Amino acid sequence: VSSNKAFGTNAAVATVWSFHDLVFRASANSPTITFNGSGTGVVNVANDLMLTKAGGAASLVVNDTTNNRAINVEQNVSIALGATLQAPPTAGFTVAGSWSNSGTLSHGSGTITFDGTGTSQTINGGSSSFYDVVFDGVGGVWSPVTTTLLVANNLTTTNGTLGSVLDSADVVVNGSVGGDNGVISITNPGRTFTQRVTSVQSFVPTGSGNYWTFSNLTFSNGNGSATPVKVT
């Protein structure tokens, strides 16, 4: 598209929109594509969700913050340079594959759940932070790569493993770290897991299968003052 457009029906009922690949592409100018819908519903993508732009386009914004549609992606999410994904603030956003961001994620204070079961999934968050992140794929493995995995609020490991021999990036969490049966394994030499907080937060592995191992583990004060911060 080359101008602002709406995406999908505006019916005030629950609707399901299903796609194989879903590609949003700016061909020129700086368009915004806004998810339509005064009702509720889910956007199901059986393969990849991609945001991209042609060389003649300045930027692309895909806005799912305003109408808050749930998104379910069965494979990968990619955001190209110059593209911005404005995520739903309260509706579900699940991704079963890898995440690659060369543009911008505007997290909307929402939750993104990685629920895949593959063992070679990667997360390159670019310069953007997630808000709440949940890992909940039985047997799944996710590796932070290229740029630091930034979590502005909480990180939860419910099932699966965060970290593998493929890790090439650090992890920084500004909220609590917890989970039931998930594993954190940031053990590659030189890689660091940091919990950088501005208020009291928790760091609690729970559940019989929840083991956390680190090459480097750092707790730091992110409030810019000498006031102590307690991690429990």
Image (tube, rainbow, N blue to C red):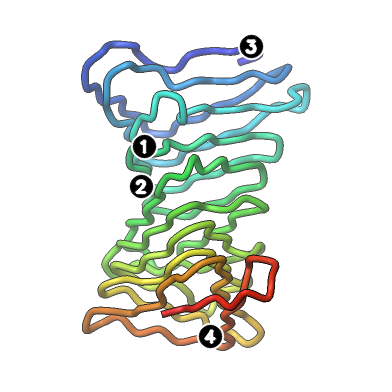
Q: Which mark is residue 187?
A: 4
Front-most of residues 217 and 184: 217
Left or right position of 166 against 94: right
Rendering quarter of residue 47: top left
Foreground: 228 or 143?
Answer: 228
Tell me which label, 3 or 4, sits earlier in the chain.
3
**Nearer to us in this view, 209 or 177:** 177
Tell me whether circle 3 and circle 2 mark residues in contact (CB < 8 Å): no
Per the image, the residue denoted by label 1 is: 71
Residue 36 horizontal/vertical position (percent): 40, 17
Q: CA distance from mark 2 to mark 4?
A: 26 Å
At x 34%, y 58%, the residue is 116
Question: For the residue marked with disc 2, what is the amino acid?
Answer: Thr
* Mark 2, other Cα within 10 Å: few <14 / some 14–19 / many ≥20: many
Residue beneath disc 2: 94
Q: CA distance from mark 4 to mark 1?
A: 32 Å
Q: Secondary structure at mark 4?
A: loop
Residue sticking out furthest to the front: 227
N-term mark: 2 or 4: 2
**Pointer 4 or 1: first along the chain:** 1
Residue at point 57% right, 43% down? 105
Q: Position of residue 218 (x, y in %)?
A: 59, 82
Q: Are marks 2 and 4 in contact (CB under 8 Å)?
A: no
Where is mark 3, residue-wise? 3
Quadrant where the C terminus sits is bottom left
Tag 1: amino acid: Ile
Q: Are marks 1 and 3 in contact (CB under 8 Å)?
A: no
Q: Earlier in the sequence, mark 1 or mark 2?
A: 1
Residue 46 x/y as whole percent: 34, 39
Dots 1, 2 in contact, CB < 8 A: yes
Q: Residues within 10 Å of mark 4 (few under 14, many from 20)?
A: some
